[in-house]
Image: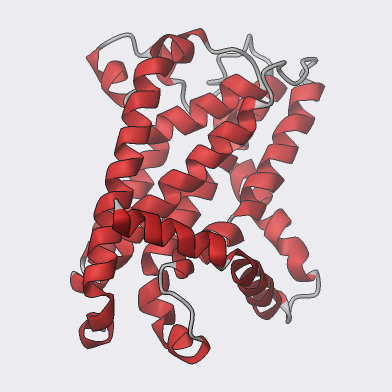
């Protein structure tokens, strides 16, 4: 617990630095592009639009009374939430290994690097959530009265992404092949978390298992709060909340322990 408290304090203490590093990284990444940092918004929208065309218009697997805009709003919000966590986790898991030389020059804690990756991914969530809201109004609906809970689920997504990234960032250095396994798990996670297809339709043991996933909790919780009430999610929300925060805390405790134990020797493994 002491290790975890120290790690969390470092994130709060160096929060202004995290924001500055995100701005610097974005400027250096998009400085040679004609549209500049607008690509942070355009790129995720274009990529996710492909899924909408295939599954929303092509296969007609919408489950929203045949309303493509309702499905688009539902899918875009789920995709935005998922892609935010996916980019945060994959980027944060490799952040220490890729940028350890930068830390040695600027003298700030290694534990801050996953947070920088998470902050950089926020634009993906904001872009797709905005498009989701537009589609929601085009479908004839409006934002749910439970919208304040969006802040809670976003906070939950940040906590899960950071704790999992911190744990992975140490394992990736100790076991380089682990990143390939992590990419495979995360690529499967999009489908198993019900980002495109409704897990609510699985009224069997498979559906019950998938609904225990912390990713399902965040994705469907966000939809429940912003778009419309999800009765199936609400039925499992109490159990899901316990499992989610238990998993997140375990990741944070284990990740903090491994990070502080091996951080002095990271350069030897790289």
Residue sitting at x 28%, y 76%: 263
Percent across and percent down for residue 158 are 50, 47
Choose top left, top right, bottom left or bottom right for residue 201.
Answer: top left
Q: Work out whether residue 145 or residue 67 is closer to the camera in this orientation and state it.
A: 145
For the C terminus, give its image quadrant: bottom left
Instruction: Please give the count of numbered marks on the rendered protein.
Output: 0
The answer to whether residue 153 is left or right of residue 174 is: right
Q: Is residue 5 left or right of residue 173?
A: right
At horizontal 36% and vertical 48% (from top left) the residue drawn is 186
Q: Classify 251 as above or below 203.
A: below
Q: How is the image coloured?
A: secondary structure
Q: Position of residue 167 (x, y in %)?
A: 30, 58
Front residue of this view, candidates 155 and 10: 10
**Nearest the eye: 166 or 203:** 166
Residue 18 at least partly seen: yes
Vertical placement of 264 versus 88: above or below? Answer: below
Residue 192 visible here: no
Residue at horizontal 66 percent and vertical 21 percent from the top: 227
The residue under the point 32% across, 65% down is 169
Q: Is residue 75 above or below residue 49?
A: above
Where residue 183 sits in the image (x, y, percent)?
33, 56
Please state the horizontal and vertical placement of residue 100, each as a whole percent of the image.
40, 82
Farthest residue in the front direction?
A: 2
In the rendered view, does 118 fall on the left or right side of 184?
right
Compare residues 14 and 193 and report the one nearer the observer. Answer: 14
Quick check: 19 left or right of 208? right
């Amino acid at each position: 617990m002491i290790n975890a408290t120290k790690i969390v304090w470092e994130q709060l203490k160096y929060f202004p630095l995290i924001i500055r590093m995100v701005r610097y990284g974005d400027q250096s990444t998009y400085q040679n592009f004609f549209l500049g940092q607008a690509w942070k918004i355009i790129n995720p929208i274009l990529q996710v639009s492909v899924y909408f065309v295939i599954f929303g218009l092509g296969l007609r697997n919408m489950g929203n009374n045949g309303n493509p805009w309702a499905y688009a709003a539902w899918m875009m919000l789920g995709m935005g939430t998922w892609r935010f966590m996916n980019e945060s986790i994959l980027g944060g898991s490799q952040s220490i290994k890729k940028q350890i030389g930068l830390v040695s020059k600027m003298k700030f804690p290694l534990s801050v690097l996953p947070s920088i990756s998470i902050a950089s991914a926020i634009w993906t969530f904001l872009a797709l959530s905005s498009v989701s809201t537009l589609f929601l109004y085009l479908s004839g609906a409006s934002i749910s009265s439970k919208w304040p809970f969006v802040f809670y689920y976003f906070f939950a997504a940040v906590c899960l992404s950071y704790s999992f990234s911190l744990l992975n960032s140490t394992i990736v250095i100790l076991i380089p092949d682990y990143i390939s396994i992590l990419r495979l798990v995360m690529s499967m996670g999009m489908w198993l978390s019900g980002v495109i297809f409704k897990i609510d339709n699985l009224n069997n043991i498979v559906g019950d298992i998938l609904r225990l996933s912390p990713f399902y909790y965040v994705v469907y919780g966000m939809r429940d709060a912003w778009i419309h009430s999800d009765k199936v999610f609400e039925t499992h929300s109490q159990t899901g909340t316990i499992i989610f925060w238990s998993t997140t805390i375990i990741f944070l405790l284990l990740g903090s322990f491994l990070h502080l134990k091996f951080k002095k020797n990271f350069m030897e493994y790289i």
